[in-house]
Image (cartoon, rainbow, N blue to C red):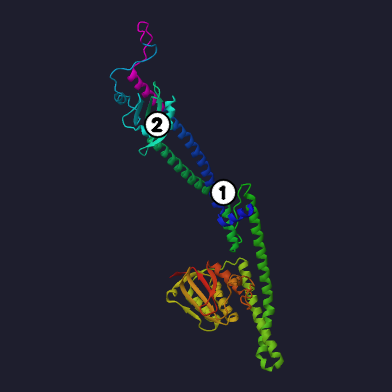
Amino acid sequence: MRRRLARWGRHRIGLSLRGRVMLAYGLLALGLSSVLALVTWTVVSEYLTQQRESSARVETSDNAAAFQYGLFGPPQACRPDREHVECGTATLKPNVSVIDLLNSLPSTDSASSMVYYDGQWYSLTGRPSDLPPDLLAEVRNGSTSQRRITVGGQPVLAVGVPLRGPGEVFFEWHPLSNLDNTLRTLKLTLIVAAIVTVLIGLAVGRLASTLALRPLAALTRVADAVARGRLDARLEVEDDRDLGGLARSFNQTAADLERRVAADARFAGDVSHELRTPLMTMLNSMQLIQNHRSELPTAVREPVELLGDDLERFRRLVIDLLEISRDDGGDRGSREIVRIADLVRAAANAAAGREVTTVAPEAEGLTLQADKRRLERVIANLVENAEDHAGGCKGVSVEAGGLGVIIAVDDAGPGIPAADRDRIFERFGRGETSNRSRGVGLGLAIVARHVQWHHGTIHVTERPGGGARFVVELPAKTV
């Protein structure tokens, strides 16, 4: 089950290798920054809180001692001549005001001071009713204690110190707003630092992935070049122990493939050349027989016509083999500036034997650096394919758009199913979902090769009103 979930997660996320490396660095940075921020927050917040509580306790104890000093004076020492005074006790000073004593205490950061003395509460600003009962009970039992409370919507630390008399206590409230602001600032700083750390981790991950995947990017570019027909493309062999072997193996494979393709092309070219002489003999003989067709017996005329059709197909197949072997053999061709409208009009009308070309006004001046022979072959093959296998060519149009110019060839056939629209451009490709023998042979494969040679594209769509439409886009510009 775990494996299924992991596999499902990989399919759902669909991250590239670079994305996964960046994500790993980002998660690592997030984890480290989170741990560091948590530890920093815990240590610093506890330290600041303890320091604040300790300072508040000391200040409250000092003020309680100062209050008692002002109220009773210092403890008297033992004197033999004063028997009425007990050793180590203090006497209440006459005419002492408790409120005046509270008001005269040393200035501290406390917000309020209050005292319970002689059965009565005395306070400058605070209200004794705001004290928690359990805190008050603890201090009256003789324990110095503190508690964080909220008074008037503000957080304060209430610290209580017991006095000399039974039940007498001294309290002070110390504001915690500064401490809370400091902790809030620390929290925001740590969060921002964590976010910045994650962003830095993603940037470092991207840089690391770029450096690490640079050889893979080079391999992708060279492999794409080989797939597009540049069989002489090679990788630069590096001294890296891990990547050098891969580069050498790829180069060796590409070299073997280039030799194999060249050998096959030479073989196909040699066979085609060898077939041309007997083929011409047979075609001439067939032409002679057809010239005397009226003299042949009736039973022989139909087989002769069938033989003539097959010989014509054989002739076109040999020509296509010569064409494809020329490309596979590394024929670079020659480029020249051609006016596309004129070339298409001449090639399409000649292949169809009638006027089938329509050129938009804005496409009349479009030109292209092209191999004239290859481009004429593209148009002728598409028109002949429509004439021979699709009920006839319904028209050829030339318009500006796409990569520069759009050439569309329409036929009157039943159309091509979507599942077959890529397969028909393969060598000897047949549409598996159609009963018609469209695309049989090398004609459409040659068209695809020549269009790609011109850095263009070709695809098949449905023609409005029925049939198929072959669309060729080429990079053209206006004169």
Pointer 1: residues within 10 angstroms few (<14), some, or many (20+)?
A: few
Is 86 above or below relative to 180?
Answer: above
Find residue 464 and report its horizontal and vertical position in percent: 51, 78
Is 331 above or below relative to 390?
Answer: above
- Amino acid at pointer 1: Ala
Image side of residue 127 versus residue 344, left or right: left
**Mark number displayed over residue 276:** none
Q: Residue furthest front?
A: 119
The magenta-colored residue range is 56-84
Find residue 181 and report its horizontal and vertical position in percent: 39, 38
| Tag 1 residue | 212
- Marks 2 and 1 sit apart, C-alpha to C-alpha, by 61 Å
Say which quarter of the image contains residue 377: bottom right
Pointer 2: residues within 10 angstroms few (<14), some, or many (20+)?
A: many
Please say whether residue 263 is visible from this viewpoint.
Answer: yes
First-in-chain label (2 vs 1): 2
Q: Foreground residue, 176 or 368?
A: 176
Q: Foreground residue, 426 or 292?
A: 426
Q: Quadrant of the C terminus?
A: bottom left
Q: In the structure shown, which secondary structural element does the residue marked by tag 2 occupy?
A: strand
Q: Foreground residue, 125 or 104?
A: 125
Find residue 410 and report its horizontal and vertical position in percent: 53, 78
- Amino acid at pointer 2: Ala
Q: Is residue 431 magenta?
A: no
Is 455 above or below relative to 297?
Answer: above
**Mark number displayed over residue 158:** 2
Q: Foreground residue, 400 or 109?
A: 109
Say which quarter of the image contains residue 263: bottom right
Please say whether residue 219 is visible from this viewpoint.
Answer: no
Find residue 403 and report its horizontal and vertical position in percent: 48, 68
